[in-house]
Amino acid sequence: MRVPHTDRQRRRAQEFEDFVAGAAGRLLHTATLLTAEPAHPPGANARAEGLLRAALARTYADWDRLCGEDPYDRTRQDLAVRFAREARRHHRPRGGLLERLTPRERLVLVLRLYEGVAEEQTASLLGLPPDRVRAICSRAVTALRSGPGSRAARPAARRPQATA
Protein backbone atom coordinates (compact mmCIF):
# COMPACT_ATOMS: atom_id res chain seq x y z
CA MET A 1 0.00 0.00 0.00
CA ARG A 2 1.31 3.40 -0.99
CA VAL A 3 1.38 6.24 1.43
CA PRO A 4 -0.46 9.29 -0.03
CA HIS A 5 2.08 11.64 1.51
CA THR A 6 4.88 10.04 -0.53
CA ASP A 7 2.85 10.34 -3.75
CA ARG A 8 2.23 14.00 -3.01
CA GLN A 9 5.93 14.56 -2.42
CA ARG A 10 6.80 12.87 -5.71
CA ARG A 11 4.20 14.90 -7.58
CA ARG A 12 5.46 18.10 -5.95
CA ALA A 13 9.04 17.28 -6.85
CA GLN A 14 8.06 16.44 -10.46
CA GLU A 15 6.08 19.69 -10.83
CA PHE A 16 9.04 21.67 -9.52
CA GLU A 17 11.49 19.84 -11.81
CA ASP A 18 9.24 20.62 -14.78
CA PHE A 19 9.17 24.28 -13.76
CA VAL A 20 12.96 24.41 -13.41
CA ALA A 21 13.45 22.67 -16.76
CA GLY A 22 11.39 25.35 -18.45
CA ALA A 23 12.46 28.46 -16.55
CA ALA A 24 16.00 27.97 -15.27
CA GLY A 25 17.74 29.08 -18.47
CA ARG A 26 15.99 32.43 -18.62
CA LEU A 27 16.29 32.96 -14.87
CA LEU A 28 20.02 32.21 -15.02
CA HIS A 29 20.41 34.72 -17.84
CA THR A 30 18.52 37.28 -15.74
CA ALA A 31 20.80 36.59 -12.75
CA THR A 32 23.87 36.83 -14.99
CA LEU A 33 22.75 40.22 -16.29
CA LEU A 34 22.18 41.40 -12.72
CA THR A 35 25.60 40.34 -11.48
CA ALA A 36 27.28 41.63 -14.68
CA GLU A 37 29.31 38.47 -14.96
CA PRO A 38 30.28 36.95 -18.28
CA ALA A 39 28.03 34.07 -19.32
CA HIS A 40 30.86 32.13 -20.96
CA PRO A 41 32.88 30.04 -20.32
CA PRO A 42 30.59 27.84 -18.20
CA GLY A 43 31.07 28.57 -14.52
CA ALA A 44 32.16 32.17 -15.10
CA ASN A 45 28.88 33.35 -13.59
CA ALA A 46 29.21 31.71 -10.18
CA ARG A 47 27.53 34.59 -8.32
CA ALA A 48 24.55 34.44 -10.65
CA GLU A 49 24.29 30.69 -10.21
CA GLY A 50 24.36 31.12 -6.42
CA LEU A 51 21.61 33.74 -6.52
CA LEU A 52 19.48 31.51 -8.71
CA ARG A 53 20.04 28.43 -6.53
CA ALA A 54 18.93 30.37 -3.46
CA ALA A 55 15.85 31.78 -5.23
CA LEU A 56 14.87 28.35 -6.57
CA ALA A 57 15.34 26.80 -3.12
CA ARG A 58 12.96 29.40 -1.70
CA THR A 59 10.42 28.73 -4.45
CA TYR A 60 10.63 24.99 -3.77
CA ALA A 61 10.13 25.55 -0.05
CA ASP A 62 7.01 27.62 -0.80
CA TRP A 63 5.78 25.40 -3.66
CA ASP A 64 2.68 24.09 -1.86
CA ARG A 65 1.72 27.61 -0.72
CA LEU A 66 1.85 29.26 -4.16
CA CYS A 67 -1.94 28.76 -4.55
CA GLY A 68 -2.16 29.66 -8.22
CA GLU A 69 0.65 32.23 -8.07
CA ASP A 70 3.09 32.08 -10.98
CA PRO A 71 6.26 30.33 -9.78
CA TYR A 72 8.34 32.20 -12.37
CA ASP A 73 7.21 35.56 -10.99
CA ARG A 74 7.83 34.40 -7.43
CA THR A 75 11.33 33.18 -8.28
CA ARG A 76 12.15 36.34 -10.23
CA GLN A 77 10.98 38.49 -7.31
CA ASP A 78 13.11 36.51 -4.87
CA LEU A 79 16.07 36.76 -7.23
CA ALA A 80 15.66 40.55 -7.49
CA VAL A 81 15.28 41.01 -3.74
CA ARG A 82 18.32 38.84 -3.02
CA PHE A 83 20.36 40.78 -5.57
CA ALA A 84 19.25 44.12 -4.10
CA ARG A 85 20.16 42.95 -0.60
CA GLU A 86 23.57 41.72 -1.74
CA ALA A 87 24.22 44.55 -4.24
CA ARG A 88 27.42 45.67 -2.53
CA ARG A 89 28.92 42.28 -3.44
CA HIS A 90 28.07 42.88 -7.08
CA HIS A 91 29.45 46.42 -7.29
CA ARG A 92 32.59 45.33 -9.10
CA PRO A 93 31.41 43.53 -12.19
CA ARG A 94 33.65 41.07 -13.96
CA GLY A 95 33.13 41.75 -17.64
CA GLY A 96 29.45 41.21 -18.24
CA LEU A 97 27.24 43.02 -20.69
CA LEU A 98 25.99 45.57 -18.14
CA GLU A 99 29.25 46.08 -16.26
CA ARG A 100 29.20 49.90 -16.64
CA LEU A 101 25.98 50.22 -14.66
CA THR A 102 25.54 50.42 -10.91
CA PRO A 103 23.81 47.47 -9.24
CA ARG A 104 20.57 49.45 -8.87
CA GLU A 105 20.66 50.53 -12.52
CA ARG A 106 21.24 46.92 -13.59
CA LEU A 107 18.36 45.72 -11.42
CA VAL A 108 15.89 48.27 -12.76
CA LEU A 109 17.01 47.86 -16.36
CA VAL A 110 16.84 44.06 -16.28
CA LEU A 111 13.43 44.01 -14.60
CA ARG A 112 11.94 46.66 -16.87
CA LEU A 113 13.47 45.87 -20.25
CA TYR A 114 14.60 42.25 -20.20
CA GLU A 115 11.89 40.81 -17.96
CA GLY A 116 9.14 43.25 -18.96
CA VAL A 117 8.03 43.98 -15.41
CA ALA A 118 5.74 47.00 -15.23
CA GLU A 119 7.13 50.22 -13.78
CA GLU A 120 4.69 50.15 -10.85
CA GLN A 121 5.54 46.53 -10.02
CA THR A 122 9.26 47.27 -10.18
CA ALA A 123 8.78 50.29 -7.92
CA SER A 124 6.77 48.25 -5.44
CA LEU A 125 9.29 45.41 -5.42
CA LEU A 126 12.20 47.79 -4.79
CA GLY A 127 10.38 50.15 -2.44
CA LEU A 128 10.87 53.14 -4.74
CA PRO A 129 8.44 55.63 -6.27
CA PRO A 130 7.57 54.89 -9.93
CA ASP A 131 9.11 58.17 -11.12
CA ARG A 132 12.40 57.16 -9.48
CA VAL A 133 12.30 53.80 -11.29
CA ARG A 134 11.64 55.66 -14.56
CA ALA A 135 14.61 57.98 -13.94
CA ILE A 136 16.97 55.12 -13.05
CA CYS A 137 15.93 53.16 -16.14
CA SER A 138 16.38 56.18 -18.37
CA ARG A 139 19.83 56.90 -16.91
CA ALA A 140 20.87 53.26 -17.39
CA VAL A 141 19.76 53.22 -21.03
CA THR A 142 21.58 56.49 -21.65
CA ALA A 143 24.74 55.12 -20.05
CA LEU A 144 24.62 52.02 -22.23
CA ARG A 145 24.03 54.05 -25.38
CA SER A 146 26.89 56.42 -24.66
CA GLY A 147 29.39 53.89 -23.35
CA PRO A 148 32.34 52.32 -25.16
CA GLY A 149 31.31 50.37 -28.22
CA SER A 150 28.13 52.34 -28.82
CA ARG A 151 27.58 54.49 -31.88
CA ALA A 152 27.46 57.65 -29.80
CA ALA A 153 30.89 56.89 -28.31
CA ARG A 154 32.62 55.99 -31.58
CA PRO A 155 34.48 58.73 -33.38
CA ALA A 156 33.17 59.56 -36.80
CA ALA A 157 34.95 57.75 -39.58
CA ARG A 158 37.31 59.97 -41.48
CA ARG A 159 36.88 60.31 -45.19
CA PRO A 160 40.01 60.04 -47.27
CA GLN A 161 41.30 63.35 -48.50
CA ALA A 162 41.00 63.86 -52.22
CA THR A 163 44.34 64.69 -53.79
CA ALA A 164 44.36 67.22 -56.56
Image (cartoon, grey):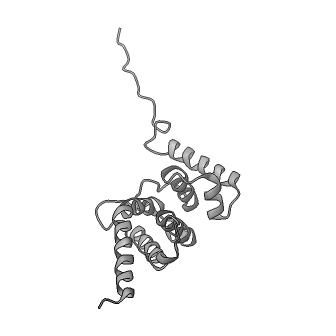
Judging depth in this view, the residue of 46 and 129 nearest the camera is 129
Judging depth in this view, the residue of 67 and 33 nearest the camera is 67
Q: Residue furthest top?
A: 164
Give above or below for 65 relative to 108: below
Judging depth in this view, the residue of 13 and 119 nearest the camera is 13
| Marker count (numbered) | 0
Q: Where does residue 21 sit, x and y in percent of width and height? A: 33, 65
Q: Where does residue 132 sit, x and y in percent of width and height? A: 68, 54
Residue 162 figure quarter: top left
* Residue found at x 52% / y 67%: 68
Give above or below for 96 relative to 59: above
* Residue found at x 52% / y 42%: 146
| Quarter of the image where the N terminus is located | bottom left
Give above or below for 67 relative to 8: above
Q: Where does residue 24 sit, x and y in percent of width and height? A: 37, 64
Q: Where does residue 73 sit, x and y in percent of width and height? A: 51, 63
Relative placement, left or right, of 98 versus 45 is: right
